[in-house]
């Protein structure tokens, strides 16, 4: 309802930031929320106190898409059961969790798919997600930095159980942990292109090599 209200009252938000705080409970989007050049807000914040979940009605479909011209977007405190796609623009994620997102029909990144733009994820988690490539996260362009985040128990049917990188750049930092992920190739991480680095410190009790 809050999304629909924001679309109806577009004049009020012309070139202004929009902040939406989701009420506790499950929120199902009948169609992906696509933000692009026609989105007139200058910046969008989507928040929760930690007891709200967001998902697409269609299994495997993205809940949120940042397309060409999208304003900067901030996600905070959400539980997500569907992918987020970033084509371009800027996305900042803090204290969010992806749980059981995606499925066998998702090609890349059942939690987060970065095709372009700049993405930063901090203090978050990806658990039990599944895709063909990049069970939790896939980067095929743009840049991604992941800090203080866990990727655990994710599955890729082809490559990159936790993370799949085929283009762009990905940086894991500040104790980000990949553990218990599975795939025929690259159970934790599969690098097929682009660049991947791990900025110290590594997670406590883990060598950099064992994290991959």
Image (tube, rainbow, N blue to C red):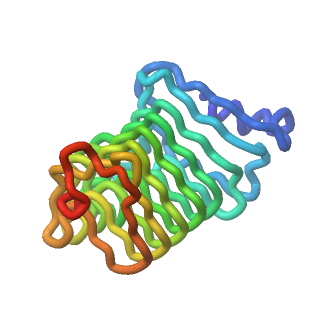
Q: Position of residue 86 (x, y in %)?
A: 54, 59
Q: Position of residue 191 (x, y in %)?
A: 32, 74
**Rendered-image quadrant of the C terminus:** bottom left
Residue at the spot x=49%, y=21% of the render? 49
In the displayed structure image, the side of residue 7 where residue 55 appears, left or right: left
> Is 208 located above or below residue 14 in the figure?
below
> Is 208 located above or below residue 82 in the figure?
below
Q: Position of residue 162 (x, y in %)?
A: 27, 57
Q: Can I make out residue 81 in this image? A: no
Residue at the spot x=67%, y=40% of the render? 44
In the displayed structure image, the side of residue 212 where residue 29 appears, left or right: right
Quadrant in the rendering for residue 187: bottom left
Q: Position of residue 145 (x, y in %)?
A: 48, 56
Residue at the spot x=15%, y=59% of the render? 182
In the displayed structure image, the side of residue 32 where residue 44 appears, left or right: right
Q: Can I make out residue 126 in this image? A: yes
Foreground residue among 130 and 210:
210
Residue at the spot x=52%, y=51% of the render? 120
């Amino acid at each position: 309802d809050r999304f629909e209200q924001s679309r109806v009252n577009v004049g009020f938000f012309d070139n202004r930031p929009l902040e939406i705080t989701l009420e506790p409970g499950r929120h199902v989007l009948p169609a992906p929320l696509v933000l692009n050049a026609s989105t007139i807000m200058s910046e969008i914040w989507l928040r929760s106190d930690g007891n709200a979940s967001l998902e697409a009605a269609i299994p495997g479909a993205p809940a949120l898409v940042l397309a060409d011209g999208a304003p900067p977007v901030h996600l905070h405190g959400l539980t997500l059961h569907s992918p987020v796609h970033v084509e371009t623009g800027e996305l900042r994620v803090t204290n969010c969790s992806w749980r059981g997102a995606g499925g066998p029909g998702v090609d890349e990144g059942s939690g987060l798919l970065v095709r372009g733009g700049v993405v930063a994820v901090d203090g978050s988690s990806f658990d039990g997600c599944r895709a063909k490539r990049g069970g939790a996260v896939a980067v095929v362009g743009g840049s991604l930095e992941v800090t203080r985040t866990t990727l655990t128990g994710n599955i890729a049917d082809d490559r990159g159980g936790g993370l799949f990188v085929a283009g762009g750049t990905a940086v894991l930092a500040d104790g980000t942990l990949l553990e218990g992920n599975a795939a025929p190739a690259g159970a934790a991480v599969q690098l097929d292109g682009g660049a991947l680095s791990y900025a110290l410190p590594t997670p406590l009790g883990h060598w950099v090599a064992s994290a991959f």
